Amino acid sequence: MSLTNYDIQPLLVLCQEGNQLAQLEVYNRYQHAMFNVSKRIVKDSAIAEDVMQESFIAAFQKLDSFKGTATFGAWLKRIVINNSLVQYKKESKFTSLEDEWVADTPEVPTTYAEDSQDVQTQRLLNALESLHDRYRTILTLHFIEGYDYEELCEVLEISYANCRTLISRAKDSLRKKLKVAS
């Protein structure tokens, strides 16, 4: 029987014992989702790959602290998001002012063969990417990753009122960008 047929719990026990095949199986099950989470935050594939791999290493080392109150995937996602935010903050310290103000949004090609929903989705994602970093991050965590206000407050280390205000302003900014783009 291969490791792919195992439930996640027995795999985690094997991972705690240092079984590298079990760790590889867990990595293979979650790598794509965790890479996407990280890339949405850090906006760079190479950095997202590094963050994801470092997060897996940290998760395997701290596996004994996994209490099982949430799913393993949610616990791992929290590690990836925290590491991505830390890395993003490090990277943004070295970003020049010009880079912050220049929107790097590719134009959406429109052909008759494309589905209108795909075009709308791409427009929305392009508008989201062109938002100020703080707005983009909070909307991504809230709407794409599904974090509620309390979780956002904890992850971003902001007050509840600040969280609500930030989401409201981010939505307004996104609406304006979508209005201009149409």
Image: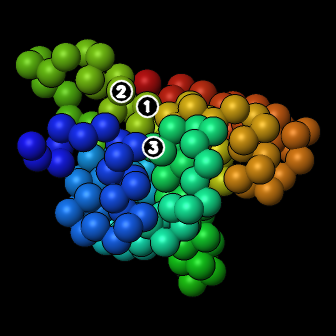
Where is mark 2, residue-wise? Answer: 121
Identify the disc placed on residue 73.
3
The residue that appears at 23% across and 54% down in the rendered structure is 25
Q: Do the residues labelled 2 and 3 touch (CB within 8 Å)?
A: no
The residue that appears at 18% across and 38% down in the rendered structure is 5
Q: Are marks 2 and 1 in contact (CB under 8 Å)?
A: yes
Where is mark 1, residue-wise? Answer: 124
Label 3: element kind: helix
Q: Which of marks 2 and 3 is nearer the N terminus?
A: 3
Horizontal arrangement in the rendering, residue 124 relative to residue 117 (left or right): right
Work out whether 142 lies above or below 99: above
Snapshot quadrant of residue 120:
top left
Label 1: element kind: helix
Amino acid carrying label 1: it is Leu
The residue that appears at 82% across and 35% down in the rendered structure is 164
Badge 2, how many Cα within 10 Å: few under 14, some, many 20+? few
Whether residue 57 is visible to the viewer of this picture, yes or no, is yes
How far across and down, in percent of the image, does residue 86 sit?
61, 70
Q: Which of 47 and 81 is in front in this view?
A: 81
Amino acid carrying label 3: it is Gly
Work out whether 146 lies above or below 162: above
